Amino acid sequence: MKRIAEILSWLALAVTLAPACLFFADKLDLAQTQVWMLAGTALWFIATPFWMEHKAS
Amino acid sequence: MSDQPHSHDPVEEFERERVPDRALLGLKSYVGQFAGEHVAGTELMIGPLFLAAGVSAFDLIVGLLVGNLLAVLSWTLFTAPIATRVRLTLYFQLEKICGRKLVTLYNVANGVMFTFLAGAMITVSATALGVWFKFPMPGFGDLMPNSLGWVVAVLVTGTLFSFVAAYGYKFVAEFANMAVPWMIAVFVAFGIIGLRELGLTSFGDFWHVAQTVIWKGGDPMPGQVKFTFWHVMFFAWFCNMAWHIGMADLSLFRYARKSWYGIASAAGMFIGHFMAWIAASILYALQLHQDPTNTAVLPGPLAYRACGIAGLLCVIAAGWTTANPTLYRAGLAFQSLVPSSSRFRVTLLTGLVASVTAVFPLVTMKLLDFVALWGMILMPMGAVIFVDFWVLPRLGLRSNFAEATGRSVNWAAGLAWLLTMAVCTALVQFAGVQIYFVSLPGWFVAAILYVALSHVFQKRTQP
């Protein structure tokens, strides 16, 4: 389960960042880019708590 | 920036003893901690303020590269070597040198600066609410609030932050750790989207666009100091001066296995104080490109324009996750005045004061000056620690004088601190030295004063 969550987190980071690159390459418009970034953000905050080590003091 | 306090002390223990070998940490943990700490809400203000200061592309890029390199070297060559030898917290080390009462005064100075900084972070987060609720927000250079909506948004944001800092510090610290990789990704996206919107279609043209569209140089905006290469370099070097040359990160590096782990600070400097500042600056350039009359430096609208709701969430998270440890540290600093007082109440009260300061965007609009001032105020104590550790024993003088003599105030350290601040203030007020530069001569003034005064006081007093 943790392993799946970790993979989803890294996928979420890609979904957050890749739309900006695709926008730069004229493959997405700005509205689409922002929707995909929001999706990546949501996935990151759903998946990451399942695996990220709690290191904070 | 760290422009912020470090919330990343690995564990809250060994406060009055040497860190044992079993508790030492490796390089990797320092890289992660620095990378996380220096992507803060205030980065979204600093980048635009560089642009408002009329900086040119070369001065900004090269100034940041050199200044951040000097900051990394300061951590590596000043802070970490002492930290890994004494392995004590800053406060305990200072107490040994300066005495308990002087440390308390230092704590209060630190606490006041933390409070204002937390206020700036609350201001940054509140600008995101302005996008949702569409109330008027302060314009560029405004020092007073300009709408009831702004006042309410700041006070609500600040009150929420204060309660969380008082109640749930640990929860937000964990959330901050989790948010860091995502925030870094969003900052990178700010830059990429901003560049494309500014007309860049190939990264090969970056330098041309940077020089002719983004950082064109020329006159600064009204009320701003013109920034040259030297301003950028010194700002990047000294914006965390309290932490490296000021030695606040003794508390952090006391856990480091090796002193060269100071180079881990490069992760924070070149992600937060290079990439993030440049990305934020690009967003402001985009705003000016689209509407030259809109000079407001408001991170919320800047981020929303590029990245939509994800951008707004980044602004809120960046402000919240850094305001939280800032308020916590400020609370601890003030609590040291009355150790029996409730940390909860002190933190809450500190947060409410920070919220009131946040209503007035004075600190936020003058953030570059504020950060330089913070470094100037705390830097002399770093010089005192440096000299006490490396120089005094070689001159036949005694280190840790307060501990050796049982004094609550080491006047050599106290006077070195106060006189250095007086000299620096005089240099700024009467000699035309700008505040961004004054801490460099100030360090040497503090060091020389501490040696001379130690000679006087120690010869008069037999421990």
Image: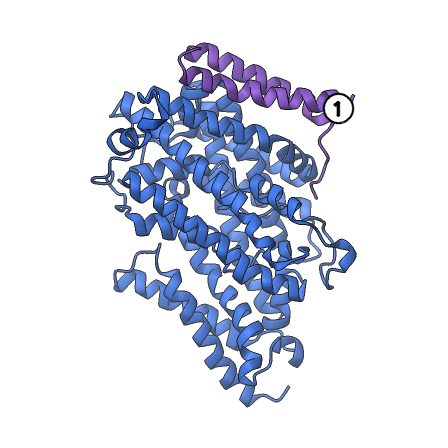
- B26 relative to B456 in the view: left or right: right
Q: Colour of chain A?
A: purple
Q: Which chain is blue?
A: B
Answer above or below: position of A56 versus B340.
above
Q: Is residue B356 visible?
A: no
Tell me the subunit letter for badge 1: A
Nearer to me, B270 or B374: B270
- At 72% from the left and 49% from the top, the residue drawn is B11
Q: Residues within 10 Å of mark 1 (few under 14, many from 20)?
A: few
Q: Quadrant of residue B103?
A: bottom right
Where's the C terminus of chain B, which quadrant? bottom right
- At 31% from the left and 60% from the top, the residue drawn is B428
Nearer to me, B152 or B460: B460
- Relative image position of residue B271 (x, y in whole percent): 50, 39
Question: Which amino acid, mark 1?
Answer: Arg
- Relative image position of residue B83 (x, y in whole percent): 62, 62
Residue that sits furthest to the left in the current view = B219
- At 49% from the left and 31% from the top, the residue drawn is B125
Q: Label 1's element?
A: helix
Nearer to me, B274 or B42: B274
Answer above or below: position of B83 versus B113.
below
> Pointer 1: what residue?
A3
Answer above or below: position of B389 versus B91.
below
- Relative image position of residue B397 (x, y in whole percent): 56, 83
- At 53% from the left and 31% from the top, the residue drawn is B184
Nearer to me, B9 or B333: B9
- Relative image position of residue B241 (x, y in whole percent): 47, 55
